[in-house]
Image (tube, rainbow, N blue to C red):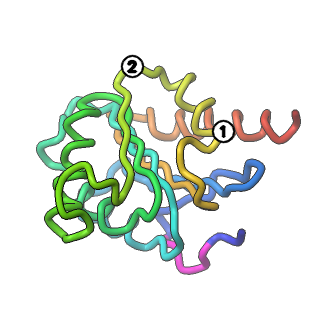
């Protein structure tokens, strides 16, 4: 599946594994509005891994959760700090924009996990996760340089899986 040529410059191609392409939506140094616009720049159906490793919590994530609820056509899997609260915010946003009649209707499908380490998470994402969309987006919120380090770790996992 070719990557959409209209992706924002802030969306990085991370690699290919078996039957899916993986992209990373840059968050480091970007405002919430910029991150939401970058998510919206993906014009192909995609599943999403939303990872929160920042100490900022969920208070400023409303635009991002709205963008995810509006744009993701498959699964949204949320990991890290406040994963359950972010999961609930995606469900609430989905109801607010009319994709779900009530929370839990499954449009988009959502899941959360607050205990996986970055190593475990990179290996899991390299398998493709829950959804079956041919494109997977990773949105990684962190303090400092953790985002770039995680994307490198993820690329290594993808390369290892391709060699197997």
Count residues near mark 1 (Cα–Cα under 10 Å), then give few for <14, some for 14-19, many for 20+: some
Residue 11 is inside the magenta segment: no
The reply to whether dot 1 and dot 2 touch (C-beta < 8 Å) is: no
Rendered-image quadrant of the N terminus: bottom right
Q: Which mark is residue 127?
A: 1
Secondary structure under the numbered disc 1 in the rendered image: helix
The picture places residue 135, in percent across and down from the top left corner, at 59, 60
Q: Residue 84 lies in what quarter of the image?
A: top left
Rendered-image quadrant of the C terminus: top right
Secondary structure under the numbered disc 2 in the rendered image: loop
Please give the name of the residue rendered at 64% of the width and 61% of the height, measured from the top-left corner. Answer: 134
Q: Main secondary structure of the magenta part?
A: loop
The picture places residue 137, in percent across and down from the top left corner, at 51, 55
Q: Residue furthest bottom?
A: 6
Mark 2 highlights which residue?
115
Give the extent of the magenta segment.
Answer: 4-8
Nearer-N-terminus badge (1/2) = 2
Vertical position of residue 68 compared to residue 125: above or below: below
Vertical position of residue 69 compared to residue 51: above or below: below
């Amino acid at each position: 599946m070719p990557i959409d040529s209209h992706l924002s410059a802030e969306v990085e191609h991370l690699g290919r594994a078996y039957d899916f392409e993986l992209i990373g939506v840059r968050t480091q140094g970007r405002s919430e509005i910029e991150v939401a616009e970058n998510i919206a720049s993906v014009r192909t159906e995609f599943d999403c891994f939303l990872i929160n490793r920042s100490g900022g919590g969920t208070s400023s994530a409303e635009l991002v959760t709205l963008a995810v609820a509006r744009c993701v056509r498959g699964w949204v899997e949320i990991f890290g700090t406040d994963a359950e609260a972010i999961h609930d915010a995606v469900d609430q946003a989905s109801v607010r924009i009319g994709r779900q009649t009530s929370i839990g209707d499954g449009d988009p499908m959502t899941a959360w996990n607050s205990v996986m380490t970055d190593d475990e998470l990179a290996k899991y994402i390299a398998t493709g996760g829950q959804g079956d969309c041919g494109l997977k987006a990773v949105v990684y919120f962190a303090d400092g340089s953790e985002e770039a380090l995680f994307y490198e770790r993820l690329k290594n996992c993808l390369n290892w899986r391709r060699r197997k």
